[in-house]
Image (cartoon, rainbow, N blue to C red):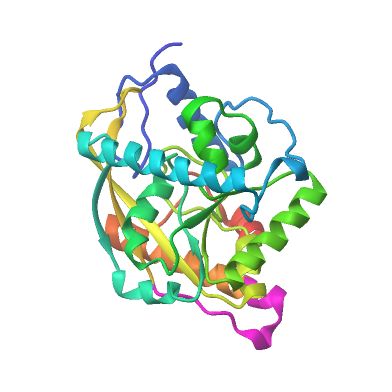
Amino acid sequence: MENVALELENEGTVSAMKLSDGRQEVLKRIREYECAGRFDEDVENDPKAPELKPDQVDYLCKKLSSKIGRTIANAIGDRYFLRLMKKQTLIIDGVTGTEHLSALKNGAIITCNHFSPFDNYVVFHGIRKHLPKKYLYKVIREGNYTNFPGLYGYLFRHCNTLPLSRNRRTMMNFMSATNTLLKNGECILIYPEQGMWWNYRKPRPFKVGGFKMAYRANVPVLPTFITMTDDTRLDGDGYPIQRMTLHIMQPIYPETALGEKLGAEKMKDEAYALCKEKYEEVYGIPLTYTCDMKENLGEVL
C-alpha cells in the first residue's frame, strides 16, 4: 500500500509519517467513522469471533481451576506490564485526582477511554493501592475472550475479565455476576465508548449499559480519562510511543429517586461531560469532530 500522509487534526504530530499498512488502514477508518458518527463500532480488522457459551466462562471464579488460572495470570500480567514500563514502551507520566479514589471503598464502576490494549493496566496501576479488594475486574468484548491465542489470550481469559457475549444466557450470567461483584464491594472497569480506537485522543459518546450496572447495584461511577503526548521514539508500527497521564475525576452517585432509565442516563451524561471537560483542559482545544456532527451526536448522546 502506498504510504499515506496522515493529517489527524488535534491527534498529535503524526503527519507525513511512514506507518505500517495495517495502522494506516485503522487510522483512515477512524476518520471515516468519526465523520459518520459511528463512534461505537470497531475499527480493527479482527476475525469473526466464536460465540461465547454459558459453560465457557466462570464469571465469579467459583471453580478451583479458575482460581488457579487467575493467580497465575495476574502474576504473569503484572510482571509483563512492569517490564514494559521499565523498558519505557509503556510510559505512565502521572496520575491526577487521586483524592477521588475514596469512592472505591464499597465498590464502583470505573470508566475509561479505550484507545490501547494497555489502557486497562494504566488504570489499574493508578488505582491499585486504593482498591478495596485485591482485583480490578474488566469488561471485555467477546472476541478478546474467545479468539486470542498465546499469552494475550491467556490473560484475556484469566485476569479477572468479564466478557460480553451474543449469547442471551451468557449475558444473563454476566449481568447477574456483575451485580454480585459490585454488591460485594468489587470494582469493575468498563469502556462506555465500546470498541477500541487506536491512539484516539478524543472522548467518544458513551453507551448507557455500564451506568445501568452501577445504578442497579447502587454504587458510584468513577470516571477516568487518559491523555497522551508523543514520545520522541516510535513504536513497531512507526507511530510515536504514547506517554500517558491518568486523570481521575469526581465520582457520580446514583439518584435513586429517578428510576433506572433516567438515573443511568444522567450518570452517563455527567461522566461524558467530565471527560469532555478534561480533554479540553489538558489539550487546550475545544472538543470537535472531523465533520459536522450535529445530527449524529443528537442521536448518540
Residue 76 in view (yes/no): yes
| Residue 215, picture quadrant | bottom right
Inspect this view and state whether residue 38 appears.
Answer: no
- Looking at the image, which residue is at 62% across and 58% down? 207
Q: Is residue 190 above or below residue 119?
A: below
Image coords of residue 103 (percent x, y):
43, 76
Q: Position of residue 108 (x, y in %)?
A: 51, 69
From the viewer's perspective, is 177 left or right of 231?
right
Residue sitting nearer the eye, 47 or 145? 145
| Pick the front one: 149 or 10 | 149
Q: Position of residue 107 (x, y in %)?
A: 51, 71
Where 61 sits versus 30, above or below? below
Q: Nearer the viewer, residue 201 or 109?
A: 109
User: Residue 267: image x %, image y %?
Assistant: 56, 73
Q: Magenta span covers which residues?
A: 250-264
Image quadrant assignment for residue 85: top left
Residue at horizontal 30 percent and vertical 47 percent from the top: 228
Indicate whether residue 52 is drawn in magenta.
no
